[in-house]
Image: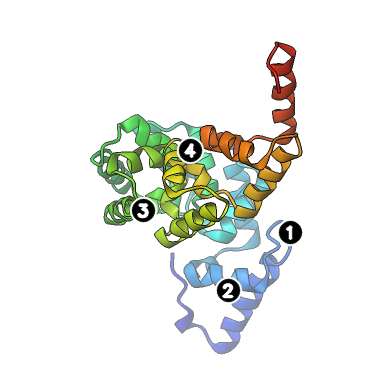
């Protein structure tokens, strides 16, 4: 469907715009002016729909496993979720299932990538084959897409360029591929951002070699907020460890930076209870 505003008089066009703004501004949509403008700019055909029709579409999609709040969030990012027919969306879900995803996978992916139902079956299959050709298995590729469905937005040339960019920091290509498998979200970060994160880690007294070694096994260390990392270091010091000891602990097991202090205290007390010393 398209919205042929050129056939409308100024008065009729104003009424249509006002009608849409009025019902999208109330529950359950609660869209603000900027959101409505962005949505209609991307999909002018939204003007063809009424409040009752969109509510009916929401109710039908809830039978697939969505909750209303999730659908509204997706709708605001990309109205296509309510503009496609129920059968069309169901077919697109089945397309993913045929490739190897579960229905639950697809629903969760669509919440994080609102463009998901804009992709054709051919496009998805082609993208998966392209990623497999980089050196991943099909299962690994599917798992990466489950974790980061935004990879589907990238062209294969963009992915290859990002891999090359990351190698310039000091990694080998096979190491970068493993890091992406562990943290697919890393493809969403600009190379300059990653370099800046490394600079910040160096200011915390880690050497470049130590940072590279940590990130090969725990790439999340590159995207943890610096302030959060400083806070974690201070929290560990409050448990009685010196700063040097804390840094050594992180170098040996960088995953400790994502553990809660409460969890670390429990582990510490357990180790003491079975005979380990401080």
Quarter of the rendering occupied by the N terminus: bottom left
| Residue pointed to by mark 3 | 169
- The crowd level at tag 1 (other Cα within 10 Å; few <14, some 14-19, many 20+) is few
* Vertical position of residue 27 compared to residue 251: above or below: below
In the foreground, 263 or 131: 263
Pair 3/1: label in front? 3
- Numbered disc 3: secondary structure: loop
- Specify the label residue 78 is tagged with: none
Q: Which residue is mark 4?
A: 218
The first of marks 3 and 1 along the sequence is 1
The residue under the point 38% across, 49% down is 152
Q: Are marks 3 and 1 in contact (CB under 8 Å)?
A: no
The span from disc 2 to disc 1 (Cα, nearest Å) is 18 Å
Side of 107 relative to 52 (left or right): left
Measure the alpha-carbon separation of dots 4 and 2.
Answer: 42 Å
Q: Give residue 126's position: percent from left, percent from top.
A: 26, 45
Mark 1 — residue? 27
Task: Specify the label residue 37 is tagged with.
Answer: 2
């Amino acid at each position: 469907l398209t919205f042929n505003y050129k056939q409308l008089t100024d008065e009729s066009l104003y009424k249509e715009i006002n009608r849409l703004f009025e019902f999208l501004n109330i529950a359950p949509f609660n869209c603000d002016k900027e959101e409505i403008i962005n949505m209609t700019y991307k999909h002018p055909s939204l003007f063809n729909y009424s409040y009752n029709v969109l509510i009916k579409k929401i109710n039908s999609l809830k039978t697939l496993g969505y909750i209303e709040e999730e659908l509204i969030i997706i709708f605001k990012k990309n109205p296509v979720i309510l503009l496609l027919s129920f059968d069309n969306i169901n077919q697109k879900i089945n397309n993913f299932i045929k490739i190897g995803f579960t229905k639950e996978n697809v629903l969760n992916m669509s919440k994080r990538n609102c463009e998901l139902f804009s992709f054709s079956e051919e496009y998805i299959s082609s993208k998966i084959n392209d990623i497999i050709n980089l050196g991943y298995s099909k299962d690994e590729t599917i798992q990466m897409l489950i974790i980061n469905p935004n990879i589907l937005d990238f062209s294969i040339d963009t992915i290859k360029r990002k891999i090359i960019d990351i190698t310039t920091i000091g990694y080998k290509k096979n190491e970068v591929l493993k890091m992406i498998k562990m943290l697919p979200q890393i493809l969403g970060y600009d190379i300059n951002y990653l370099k800046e994160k490394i600079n910040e880690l160096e200011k915390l007294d880690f050497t470049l070699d130590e940072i590279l070694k940590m990130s090969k096994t725990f790439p999340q260390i590159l995207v943890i907020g610096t302030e959060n990392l400083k806070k974690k270091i201070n929290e560990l010091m409050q448990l009685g460890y010196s700063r040097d000891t804390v840094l050594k602990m992180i170098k040996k097991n960088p995953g400790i930076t994502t553990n809660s202090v409460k969890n670390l205290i429990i582990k510490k007390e357990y180790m003491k209870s079975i005979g380990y010393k401080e």
